[in-house]
Image (cartoon, helix red, strand yellow):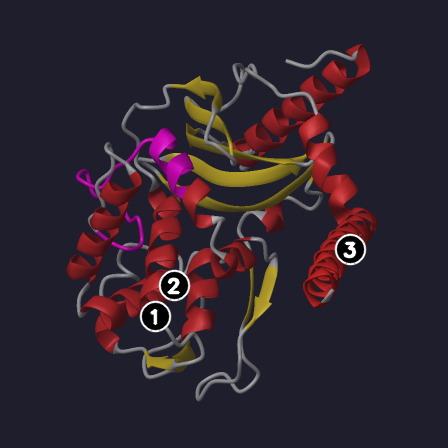
Amino acid sequence: MAARRRRRRRGYARRNAGRIVLCTFIEVIVICALVIMVGWNKGMKEWFAQFQQPILKEVDISGINSPNAILMQARGGKILGEINGEERIYPASMTKIMTVIVAIENLDDLEAKITLTDEMFAGLYEQDATQAGFQSGEDVRVIDLLYGAMLPSGAECCIALADTISGSEADFAELMNKKAAKLGMDNTHFCDSTGLHNPDHYSTVKDIAVLMKYCIKNDTFREIIETARHSTGITNVHPDGITYYSTMFKNLPDPTVTGGKILGGKTGYTSEAGHCLTSFAEIEGREYIFVSAGAVGDNTNTIPHIQDAVNIYNRVGAAIEEKMNNGSEE
């Protein structure tokens, strides 16, 4: 009898354990369902929607002002259109994209201050280099130098960052070249942090697109390049700080394009490089990168590179809309 009771108790225990496991499993299913429902209401619907958008295989980018251009999907790096994409160009101030990302990755404290010296300004006035407005002896936060390099294209900001990190601009350029090699930018060579003309300072629009694809994954870089206007902190020279503006956005009062908008970009210009632009846009839930170089402007058209970007992003949006309207998906 005692043995029978023990067997019954063990049977009850096994059945109870089974019920507990079943109840736990049901609770987990219910919780997961609730999480999915909440997530859907908070954006999952939009997240899934991007995969329902038609996927473009190719976009015609011909007939633009720039002799060198490339259109790339930011996610995955698929090239949708290309004009002389691997031909050597002078990147001019698009160089500062690399300068800023290398500085971000090598400086831990973005609130730290750097004192600008006379040596950092040497030759800038003679070369007519664009500057953000800082002066020798001024103590400037790293974050303000990063914005100063990207938005108004301040050469003094680039050199201050380069000297602080590497001790000289030449040594900093070596860091830039190492980063380029790591990213697979095989047809790029940097000589300085500013992009002032040097025959041995070159790249391709394809390599610059690869660089941009990498950079916009960095939150700090992305916040900077998406900013149209930035005011610095108080300095020992500028008690009210300095306010500067993006060289792209000030010539792009309306960033809206078909199906989306241009999110950010970096312009460049020298007489040898022509008008250059690296930009990225979100269109129908996907991001695209467009890089152009070598555009020629005149008194009636000083922003041919920006016009090219708007034109191409509009073509992307129109192509997607056409596919959506036709109900076809490639």
Measured in 3D between alpha carbons, the distance from the residue under mark 1 to the one under mark 2, in whole angstroms, is 6 Å
Give the quarter of the figure containing the C terminus: top right
Q: Residues within 10 Å of mark 2 (few under 14, many from 20)?
A: some
Residue 327 in view, yes or no: yes
288 vs 18: above or below: above
Residue 107 numbered mark, or none? 1
Q: Is residue 142 left or right of residue 323?
A: left
Question: Which span of residues is magenta-colored?
Answer: 192-211
Residue 324 appears at what percent x and percent y? Answer: 77, 18
Judging depth in this view, the residue of 194 and 258 nearest the camera is 258
Amino acid type assigned to the residue bearing label 1 in the image: Leu
The residue carrying mark 3 is 19
Mark closer to the chain start, 1 or 3: 3
Would you say the residues marked 1 and 3 are in contact, meaning their CB atoms lie under 8 Å apart?
A: no
Residue 284 in view, yes or no: no
Mark closer to the chain start, 3 or 2: 3
The residue carrying mark 2 is 104
294 vs 190: above or below: above
Q: Is residue 120 magenta?
A: no
Q: Nearer the viewer, mark 3 or mark 2?
A: 3
Label the magenta part by its dominant secondary structure: loop
